[in-house]
Amino acid sequence: MKKIINISLGPHNDNYEFETEFLGSDFHIKRIGVDGNIDRAAEKMLEWDGKADVIGLSGVKFPNAVGPKWLKAKHARNMEILTSKIQTPVTTGDALRNVAFEWSLRHIQFKFGNYFNNARVLFLSGLVNYRIAKVMSEFTDNLTFADPVLENGISKFLNSLADLDRYATGIHEVLKWIPSKRLSSSVTPIRSWNDYIMRKAIQKATVIVVPYYDFYKQLENCSIEELGGKTVITVTAYDDRVTFLKERGVDVIIDATPKLFERVVGLSVLEAIIVAALDKKKEQVTDDDLLEVISEQKMDPRVVYPSGKAKCINRFAFVIHPLSQAQLKKDKTIDYLAAFTPPAFLDTVEKLVAYAPPWVYSKVTGIKSPTGVEAEGWLITVGGTPKQMLAHDAEFTYKRLLQAARMAKRMGAQIMGLGAFTKVVGDAGVTVAKLSDIPITTGNSYSASAALWAAADAVRRIGMIKIEHGHKILGKTMVLGATGAIGSVCSRLLAKAFTEVHLIGRNMAKLLALKESISEETPDVKLHISTRADKNLADMDVIVTATSGAGKKVLDIMKVKPGCVITDVARPLDLSPEDVAKRPDVLVIESGEIELPGNPEMKNIGLPPKVAYACLAETIVLALEGRFETFTVGRNIQWEKVREIYQLGLKHGMKLAAISGVNGVFSDEDIERVAELARQAKADVSERA
């Protein structure tokens, strides 16, 4: 049986002793704490020299991973002096730490799906955790290093690896000869200010990297206000440290030290066990050897959820803007001034706000999928109304959307959605997606899906068509603009739900090709094609308008039958409010709104609580799924993506919440009124017949 002795500079009341098996060898492991007494540690090392196979020395502050070579050499000489009098191999865990840190981050990033993408990461010591920072920089640019504040009392954070390198190789060494920390520690205002900015930095971070050494000292001023909801990365998280973080509301603890046994042991002990098990001299054990053992023995990083439940919060941003001068008047100051100023005042305000930089309108919290994943985000406002966006070239809006994307990235958003008119301007998000540092989606895929979802629900609620659960709807539907990007998607979706679909377009060859394609996908649907919208208009139960007529009249609403459901997914709309008002016995749908899972909280966006526009819901669905990618951009919507986002929405608990028309959300009473008028009109027709 091989004997591993762990001599720790930590407290003696944490001592342990147990036996285990590893890599086919039996081990007896014993810990001896010396309460910080270095002389006693040296005595214990001499005492066990020759009696142990390997001695693990723990509680030693690791050398900085970056900095002058002479400083590293100094640490190496100190260790050599400490261990030169004994023959037994001594490990500090430094070699395993270097390998385990990188392995841990890459493993978590892969296993949990882009876990660190664009995370806001605060390093309490970048000098000690430089290797973690270097790997983390591959996933996010939002790195902050507190070394100047905590090491030298200087009220300044470092915000890049380049800054940390300069600090480590130059400023850091100069500051060692300046009494800045002693000065700041004795001057109350400076000390208080440093405590304040540290708390704020921790509050803003999503991930905090805490060194093993001085663990409690680094976090002594932190409460649940600072650490609540955070992910903490550290090494050798003993039970007392887990309890400490749990009491302060930490969601996730990532321990780079694998837990191979019932109790947690430090990296120096694990390294000692590996060295002994491999039967190699310590200097012969390479990083590749360590990685091979980690892989073969599945020495994955330890992930602890202090609450007892898995926790994962992904982050998004979504761009909104005022739709009219009336929305600008929701600002109390503007509304007050508009009351006694000429109309030209609002025109001026509208123009000025269009040039304003983006700002955060609302934080969004409380979104939780049935899978357990959570999402939070920010609604970012750009000031231009549609009128102002059309008054400028597309570059004017692109510039502000890219500013919003940079803001979203700094806040830690992993994907950004474009809402309202911002997803229509120019090339519909293509340029913004190419130039943005984070993925972009317009939400049009889910908007198309939700509009037809709303149509199907409206048909059921109006009750003019017999619907049997599990069977196709026995009704006739028509798609105007069927060969277009949105129209073809709508045609495919309707073919799945209805028994008969009429495809209307301007190009007969394209219509024939679309009919053939849909017939292969859905052979049990009856398809008709025509270049004339009025041919069978009066027979339709459901009509979808998806044209690019840009204001041209595409159908005569007076010719449709009572109780018909018209879904207008064209942008701009094919039917004006004046047209809609002519037929109170017809339900004209503009969009379907989505109920978000969990208990979402955000400022008013013109919808009931928990309800979001489908384009916003698409951004949230992608965040919940961890799909941080450009999903829907441009004017060509892909059928596969519409189907996929619908299925992902169901997976994450999205529900159809409301049906909207040209005048806003329909109430139950509104829909019942349309149904009653439709039944009455139908009865009148029957009497006349």
Image (cartoon, rainbow, N blue to C red):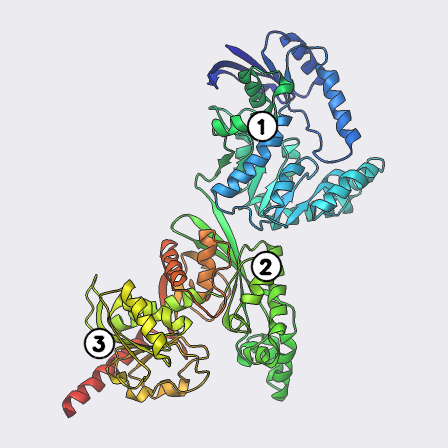
- The answer for how far apart the CA atoms under marks 2 and 3 are is 47 Å
Q: In this view, does 207 lie above or below 341?
A: above
**Is there CB contact under 8 Å for labels 3 and 1?**
no
**Is there CB contact under 8 Å for labels 2 and 3?**
no
- Dot placed on the residue nearer the N-terminal end, 3 or 1: 1
**From the viewer's perspective, is 303 left or right of 338?**
left
For label 2, the residue is: 408
Of the two numbered discs 2 and 1 in the rendering, the one whose residue sits closer to the viewer: 1
For label 3, the residue is: 464
Q: Nearer the viewer, residue 129 or 307?
A: 129
Q: Is residue 428 above or below residue 185?
A: below
Whether residue 251 is visible to the viewer of this picture, yes or no, is no
- Residue lying at 62% horizontally and 67% vertically, measured from the top left: 358
**From the viewer's perspective, is 348 left or right of 488?**
right
Residue 273, given in percent of the width and then of the height, sits at 55, 19
Please, what is the three-letter code of the amino acid marked with disc 2? Answer: Ala
Q: What is the secondary structure assignment of the residue under circle 1? A: helix
Residue 73, given in percent of the width and then of the height, sits at 77, 26
For label 1, the residue is: 288
- The answer for how far apart the CA atoms under marks 2 and 1 are is 39 Å
Mark 3: few, some, or many residues within 10 Å (few <14, many ≥20)?
Answer: some
Whether residue 606 is visible to the viewer of this picture, yes or no, is yes
